[in-house]
Image: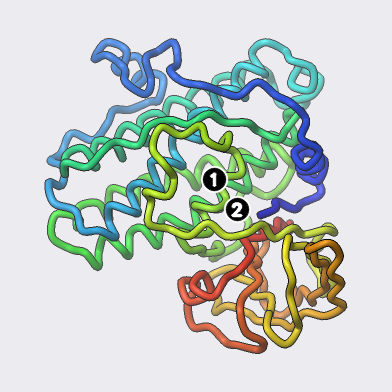
Amino acid sequence: MHFTSSSTLLALSIAAAGVAAIPFKFPLPDGFPSPSPAQLAVIEKEAGGTLPNGPLPTILKSAGITTLQLLALNEIFEVAYFTELLANVTNDVPGYDAKAIAPLDKAYVVDTLTTVANQEKLHALGVNGVLMSANQSAIKPCEYQFPVTSFIQAIALAQTFTDIVLGTLPEAQAIFAGDAGDESPLVPLFGSVLAQEGEQVGFYRFAQKKVPSAAPFLSLGSPSFAFTAIQMFIVPGSCPQPLSDVDLTTFGPLTVLNTPMAKNMTLQFAVPGAVSPFNNSIVYLSGANLPVTVPISGVSTVAGKSTFSASFPFASGFANGLTIAALVKGAGQTFKSNDAVAAATVYGPGLIEVN
């Protein structure tokens, strides 16, 4: 899995080089992930609102449980990410000082990140609350490392993983709707979370001098793509609950080697295994369109690692913002859904940001 945009190439180079960083660990000073009632009241005040007070489901089907586990993993990761980013900006860490965030005002950025971090705490507490209401185990925090060393890198990365969330929540809503019963009220509840995440990503784009809304229809994903992406930030072996307990697939990494642009072009990819133009294809998920399959070519395999090329047909109807790439089994297959792409995926997701 690889994030690719001009603002995040350096961040990923740092990650690939294995630059040491102190892992982010919980609990937080405000008690999260297990705040007291008094601490929760402060979190809610800082977040601008409270946890929903309606009845929670007492029965969840297996797909609903898996979906909520994924969402809880993501929300807790986001709490860690924005808490660290807030601390870096507040404390004028080099790369995050007033000069680095200009022309944005530091006080405005601190207020924004304070609000976002506390909103993500409520998202995480809310999802775990739903799991526990149905006699399922709450998801516990892991330890995390983030491959960014400056404010602009951090904001670009926040945009990308929030784009992934925006592409995953509609799938979650569809699962809850399909399960029906006790899960039906979760559909509008997570619709409100979806809208809140959309407000967030507008700020991250604005901070990069991009228009706040990327496209009329944002790119949709599939749960296993999001599950794989989250693990980029988790310190291996640090989770109290094995990630294998979550009934989703972790794919091998698909690295995009050059920077995509808003035009038809050729992209270079790398994977840690053997591939063949007769047995594999690249598939792109962009906007709310059907998946686009393109052949691979120029395969070179050395010491078990392969590089290859594939066309990036942006002008054929791709959306601005996030496009997801996946290397799939089979040559020339067509897919009618993103979940069908995920079922055929060998390596991915390659996360491509085009403005």
* Amino acid type, label 1: Ile
Between 276 and 56, the residue placed more toward the observer is 276
Residue shown at the point (66%, 66%) measured from the top left? 325
| Residues at marks 1 and 2 touching, judged by CB atoms closer than 8 Å | no
User: Mark 1 or mark 2: which comes first in sequence?
Assistant: 2
The location of residue 328, given as percent across then percent down, is: 62, 75
Secondary structure, mark 1, is helix
Q: Nearer the viewer, mark 1 or mark 2?
A: 1
Secondary structure, mark 2, is loop
The location of residue 187, given as percent across then percent down, is: 27, 56
Please identify the quarter of the rendering in which residue 87 is found.
top right
* Picture layout, residue 161 above or below residue 250: above
Image quadrant containing the N terminus: bottom right
Q: Is residue 65 visible?
A: yes
Residue shown at the point (49%, 50%) measured from the top left? 165
Residue shown at the point (27%, 56%) measured from the top left? 64
346 sits to left or right of 127: right
Q: CA distance from mark 1 to mark 2?
A: 23 Å
274 sits to left or right of 125: right
* Picture layout, residue 18 above or below residue 175: above
Between 308 and 185, the residue placed more toward the observer is 308
Please identify the quarter of the rendering in which residue 261 is found.
bottom right
Q: Is residue 112 visible?
A: no
Residue under pointer 2 = 213
* Amino acid type, label 2: Ser
The location of residue 37, given as percent across then percent down, is: 24, 15
Between 354 and 230, the residue placed more toward the observer is 230
Residue under pointer 1 = 230
Number of numbered markers: 2
Tell me the crowding category of disc 2: few under 14, some 14 to 19, or many 20 or more residues within 10 angstroms, Cα based: some
The location of residue 33, given as percent across then percent down, is: 36, 24
